[in-house]
Amino acid sequence: MVVSCLHFCNFANLFATIIMHIDNKRNIAILGSTGSIGRQTLDIMAEYPDLFEVGLLVANSSAALLIEQAKRYLPRRVIIARDDLYPTVRDALKDLPIDVQSGAHAIAEAVTFPEVDTVVTAMVGYSGLEPTIAAINAGKTIALANKETLVVAGDLITRLLQSSKSDIYPVDSEHGAFWQCLVGERHDDIDRLLLTASGGPFRTMPRERLATVTAADALKHPNWAMGAKITIDSATMMNKGFEMIEARWLYDIEPDRITIVVHPQSIVHSMVEFVDGSVKAQLGLPDMHLPIRYALGLPAGRLATPTHRMTLKDYASLTFEEPDREKFPLIDVAYDAARRGGNAPCVMNAANEIAVAAFLEGSIGFNDIHRIITTTMERVPYIAEPTYDDYVATNTEARAIAGNLKH
Ligand code: MG
């Protein structure tokens, strides 16, 4: 970790806070600015220069793009997670008034600085947990694109939110849809959440052929343009399991009252069924700009745009079907993990991250992802009420076990 002069920073932060209140722009920290969600968030922010300013950009390893973004948006700070890439980023930005740091602890510290209003958590996987907790403890608004944070430690995050002034807004099309369907409704009136799924690239493929599909096959998502990890999660339907757990915590609904509905056109982004039998749906193009725009607009209101409009006659046929739970057994693995609670979803997530990385490298087959996850879940001891340290230890242990199951 590289730390700059703390006293100077604190003074500068105080000054920045005063300036922010004068010009009233929301200062946004983007964790994962070089990924798919991060890049689209920057595009949207650039459309509303009077509303937003970029305060912090964080990337894991894409140093060249991070440097390019820093030169264009001139944030106060940039952080590259990988320490070995720090000299490259520092040297490239040395003539600009940008504070450059590296390492996970620098990220968790920077999200708490006073000038930051909203933290967009778009890092991949478990790495989003620590900075999200730090941001909640500092009372920041969270635009949550890192669903793994709620999968791993939803109970802990929920408890922290209760004692913080922090609000959490989902940057996920399904959860943005639930949010919109639930505006003005009473929690007691919800009967169930209907979580839509595209079904991914293998929806119509015979089950026997899944053993031989490659990462390139799985990366051809029919509707959504997303990062590699989530696209593989979408192909296995683990992503839908994660989203069920994400919804369970965001909307305080038990897993068995969340139903997955396959909807290949990805136009209905999700639905809520109420106790009187009425169903509300939210529709839109399958484009992540919509949920990002909605989350960035909250709580004030929607961000108007002339783009991203759908023509209903182009979508004359919307179809719905049940998911094939035999072909996609990770759906039931996720429901089981959600019902067990404790550290079970954390183990599932860690094993999934290792297995997906191995599949992307070509070192395991598609069906090995399920094998590695279920075997890891059998081997890591169950903890009913994990502390933060238990989650950290569980994640480390599950990764080690899953790593040994790759061959
Ligand atoms: Mg989604």
Image (spheres, helix red, strand yellow):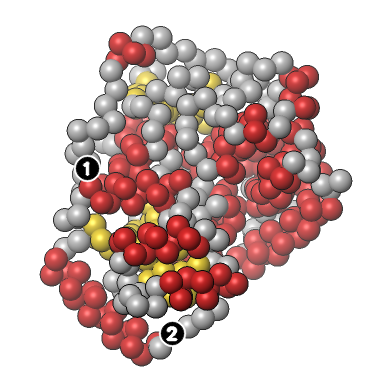
Q: CA distance from mark 1 to mark 2?
A: 36 Å
**Residue 31 at least partly seen:** no
Return the residue nearer the eye: 170 or 252.
170
Q: Is residue 118 above or below residue 176?
A: below
Determine if the C-beta at disc 1 is less than 8 A from ligand 1: no
Residue under label 1 = 303
Point 63% across, 23% down: residue? 202
Disc 1 residue crowd, few under 14, some 14–19, many 20+, Cα 10 Å: some
Residue 295 position in % (x across, y down): 33, 46
Residue 138 position in % (x across, y down): 39, 70
Residue 161 position in % (x across, y down): 42, 59
Residue 180 position in % (x across, y down): 32, 35
Point 39% across, 78% down: residue? 94
Amino acid type, label 2: Ser
Amino acid type, label 1: Leu
**Residue 229 at least partly seen:** yes
Q: Helix, strand or loop at disc 2?
A: loop
Quadrant of residue 387 within the rendered picture: bottom right
Which numbered tag is attached to residue 264?
none
Point 25% across, 61% down: residue? 53
Q: Helix, strand or loop at disc 1?
A: loop
Question: Nearer the N terminus, badge 1 or badge 2?
Answer: 2
Quadrant of residue 209 within the rendered picture: top right
Q: Is residue 195 above or below residue 17?
A: above
